[in-house]
């Protein structure tokens, strides 16, 4: 289906863009718009490099969502799931109750699963994160936009 501009803007709003590489709260090397692939901690990006990495990452994420979702969904649902996968990875969605409910067409039940994913491993402990909670609420709202 492809992620829409609204979906990309959602990801951008929560990731922010940092041209200088850094370690995210989960201690993963990161650069640009939340990119975690092939990060060179010694190399600063240009804005166009960060934007190109985001576009490439979104194509992969969108393809992952298309592969996992077996039913017709709205653009808002697709975009919300893309944001979720970009943040947590394909494996998290693939093994989730969220996906099972989406594929069962229980979209209300699926939407209620987003908030369960508001924690991150910090120093070996699973910790609730306010930023993740806000992101999951925004994904839930986008997921439910346009549904009956």
Image (tube, rainbow, N blue to C red):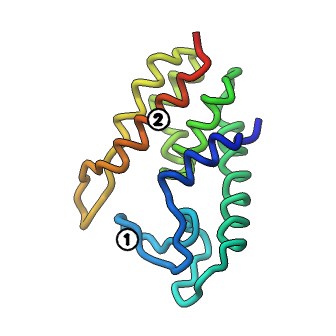
The mark closer to the camera, 1 or 2, is: 1
Residue 18 vs 105, above or below: the answer is below
The residue at the point 42 percent across, 39 percent down is 136
> Which quarter of the rendering shows the C terminus?
top right
Is 63 in front, or is 75?
A: 75
Lower position in the chain sequence, tag 1 or tag 2 = 1
Per the image, label 2 sits on a secondary structure element best described as loop
Is 81 in front, or is 71?
A: 81
Q: State the mark number for residue 96.
A: 2
Question: In which quadrant of the rendered view does residue 81 lie?
Answer: top right
User: How packed is label 1: few (under 14 Cα within 10 Å), some, or many (20 or more)?
Assistant: few
Q: State the mark number for residue 27.
A: 1
Question: In which quadrant of the rendered view does residue 27 lie?
Answer: bottom left
- Picture coordinates of residue 5 (x, y %)? 69, 43
Left/right placement of residue 69 relative to residue 23 reads right
- Picture coordinates of residue 126 (x, y %)? 25, 53
| Extreme residue in the top direction | 148
Is 74 in front, or is 95?
A: 74
Per the image, label 1 sits on a secondary structure element best described as loop
Mark 1–mark 2 Cα distance, whole angstroms, equals: 23 Å
- Picture coordinates of residue 29 (x, y %)? 47, 74
User: How packed is label 2: few (under 14 Cα within 10 Å), some, or many (20 or more)?
Assistant: few
């Amino acid at each position: 289906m492809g992620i829409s501009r609204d979906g990309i803007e959602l990801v951008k709003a929560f990731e922010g863009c940092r041209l200088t590489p850094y370690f995210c709260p989960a201690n993963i090397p990161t650069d640009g718009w939340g990119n975690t692939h092939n990060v060179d901690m010694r190399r600063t990006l240009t804005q166009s490099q960060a934007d190109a990495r985001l576009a490439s990452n979104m194509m992969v994420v969108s393809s992952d969502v298309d592969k996992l979702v077996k039913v017709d969904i709205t653009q808002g649902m697709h975009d919300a799931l893309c944001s979720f996968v970009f943040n947590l990875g394909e494996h998290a969605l693939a093994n989730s109750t969220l996906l099972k409910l989406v594929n069962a067409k229980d979209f209300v039940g699926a939407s209620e699963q987003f908030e369960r994913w508001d924690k991150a491993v910090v120093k070996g402990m699973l910790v609730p994160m306010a930023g993740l909670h806000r992101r999951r609420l925004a994904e839930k709202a986008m997921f439910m936009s346009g549904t009956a």
